[in-house]
Image (tube, rainbow, N blue to C red):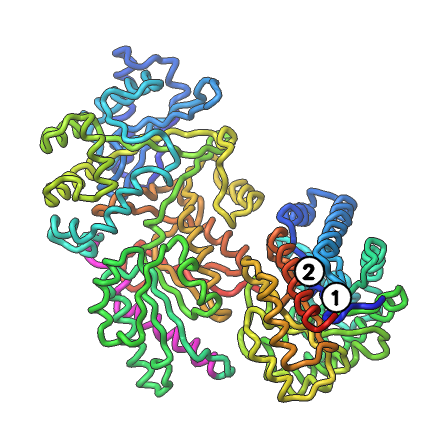
Amino acid sequence: MTLPILPTTVVGSYSMPGWLERLKTEYLGRRISRQDLDEIHDTAVKAAIKDEEVAGLDIVTDGELRRDNMIDYFVERLPGVQVDRASKKFYYDFYDSEVIGKLPSGPLGLTEDFKFLQANTTRETKVCITGPHSLSKRIRNKHYPTEAEFAADLARVLNAELKELVKAGARWFQVDEPYLSGFPEDLGWEVAALNVLTEGVNAKIAVHLCYGNRYGKPSWEGSYRYLFPGILEAKVHQLTLEFARRGGEDLDLFREFKTPFEVGVGVIDVKTQAVETAEMVAERIRKALEVLPKERLIILPDCGCFHLPRNVAFAKLCAMVEGTKIVRKELGH
Amino acid sequence: MILQINHLQKNPAAEAARDLIETVFTLVQEGHLEPSQLPSLRIHLDWIQYRQNFREAVMAIRAEELHGKSAPFLDLHVNTRDMTPEALRAGLLRTLARDAHVAEKPEDCLALEEFCSFRSSIAWQFNQLYWQRLPDWEKATGRSYEQALPGGKSDANHAAAVMDGVADFWTLLKDLEKHNRLPAEIFVLEIGVGMGTRCGLWLDRFQALDQERGTNYYPRLKFLLGDYALATLERSRPAVQKHMDLCSFIVLDALNPIRSLSFLRHKILHIHLTNVYDNLPDEQLARRDGRLYQVQVRAYLPMEDAARIGQAFGLGVTELKGMIARLLSLGPDCLSDRERGVALWQEVWKALRLEERLVCVEDLPSFSLPEGMDRSRFEEILREAPADLRVHLSTGAIESLRNTLPLLHPRGYLQVQDIFVTDLNDYRMGFYGPGKLDGSIVNWVNGVFLREVAERAGYDLHFAPFRYRPGSKTSVLYTTQRE
């Protein structure tokens, strides 16, 4: 599938409807069945895909609407992780979980999600997974001597899952690592874990690094300077970074450091409901083009649209696509 | 008949119960009450914390069915604090007579509005007027509003509390610096500044601590003083005179601080409020026999007060009603002599009462929970609460909280010093407002609902008793990041 210059996509999640939140919590309280919830998820995912298509995105996701949050969806599936299912009352809360022995290998079942996505769109697709660093920060480690070793073993299990997804036809992945900005001192072992994760995976792989979006607010503040030069050792193709809310100052890092990466430029602030204009988006892209060649830019929001109301999320994506079209035209495409 | 004692005052409860039973049975013997009425009668004995309040000694609260069905019950509320045996008899008779004419407006009252949610009542217009024209009020009473507080001063200005607060904040800054994350500009916001005393104390202490420890944070400080009234901000200036270069004075609505400060979204490291939430528009809900009711109010003046005030100001009763509307619109300048205008205002406020009725929320299509309060969680909280209950919804406080949290830096925290109910069971053991505090309204805040709304916004709320003044009823709400 040929993509246009400055391809547009989402970071992963789409707006989580209030009614779906309530139904997920109902399921948690055992007031609706798993079968009902699965049907509800299928319907919601189809609607999210449709919205992404209508907004005009080049690469779509399933909106991550099946997930309670970015951690629990994996925690529940990772073989060997013990989950206390009584530990949360609201679907969005985190489960208490721990690992007490070496993680066995085993499928996480993401292939089914991917096949559903693929069957419901003709666009290019992307599968997002939570990375080993973020998972290691939420799962209590009672087995591995160090966090680094735990993360590396998580990466081993996730690597097998990515390979299964490739076999099923997946060609784009995004590894979400929002916790890294809160623990910049972990960069060394995180890069090592990323390299275990991507080893032998024949697909385009992006790493998403932001300052957190839990509850629609940042978890940390700072500069992406901490990524350099360590991140240059990561065997990934793309970094997707947050620039809309924080401003484009850190783009200068790409002037300072020669990087091999494509860059997913966040041009939509997902922490405010104010909808950007297309011109505002275009200006943000132009700023990135001062530093990076057009062939290495991907256009997306700062982070997932999970916390935005559906009408706002949709309007923001439309503005993003329109703004991108303005710049494409200026570039002669 | 059910006699329900809603407080923990032993002697007044015992005396009131004895007097009440004797009076009720006398009224039955005299034919004022039918024996058949007794089984459906529920009488509440309340202890009203605020001596100045909106209640008469006896008040009837009827549950209204808006669609023509008969009223399911009538509750009588007796203020045991203000009650004497004579007043009880007169109050019961008056209340029963009023109830018999419930369809018409009772003749012994001058109603100032139609029934509405407390949040929409003109009582809040009086409250607003008080803050807007505070200097006029204070001039007339000869004392500042802080002197009018219980104890004569505000807990906000307790030097030891401020000192500890500054030390905690300094520790946060030090930790941020250690991790190379200290912002270039350190924003602090105080909402509701009063005379600026707390701000002055805080800044003095912060400067001293910073110098003592050689950290050089003080020059990076941006201290924002926010208040609803420009006049209040002006009055706070002298208290922070020494720190003027760091201070900004911003008119803002405590219900929506981010509207004025959106440019500081996710940037403020510390936000503090004292006794603001207890003065924000509120409404109440009651659950009775498994159904949920909105408490609606109608502001009125007892007719004898209306006649007395009217006579003192040369107005007929009907003219008085028009003059009150003019007062709420123009302030004390509603009369050509401002001092007389203030005198009128004070008299009306003193006499102002709130009649109440309960309307089933199922009959109110426009009723909605405050934004941020999830309906299913709300129902779950009520399921776990005592069966018959009356609670503050704390709409204004919830609105304020939701519109303040987005200003916080990821490591920032909010502190609110106020009067909170943190367990719904407590609502069965006391009356938590509204009351009158000088010319303003005071109302406890439902911390349970606040906690729920904060969780959905990504914060855990904690309530710590204010330990610096023995006997203080205030607590300190503080936030921590929710994972």
Identify which residue is drawn at 76% across, 78% down.
Answer: A237
Q: Which mark is on residue A13?
A: 2
Q: Main secondary structure of the magenta part?
A: helix
- Determine the chain carrying the residue at label 1: A
Q: Quadrant of residue A228?
A: bottom right
Q: Indicate the quadrant where residue B13 lies.
A: top left
In terms of secondary structure, where does tag 2 sit? loop
- Residue A118 lies left or right of residue B227; in this view the side is right
Q: Chain of mark 2?
A: A
The magenta stretch spans residue B167 = yes
Residue located farthest toward the top when viewing the structure as drawn: B31
Q: Is residue A151 visible?
A: no
In the rendered image, the residue lying farthest to the right is: A167
In the image: residue A35, left or right of residue B253: right
Q: Position of residue B221 (x, y in %)?
A: 36, 76
* Label 1 element class: strand
Q: Is residue A202 visible?
A: yes
Residue pictured at 27% horizontal, 37% vertical: B54
Q: Residue at label 1? A: A128
Classify mark 1: residues with Cα within 10 Å, few (<14), some (14-19) or many (20+).
Answer: many
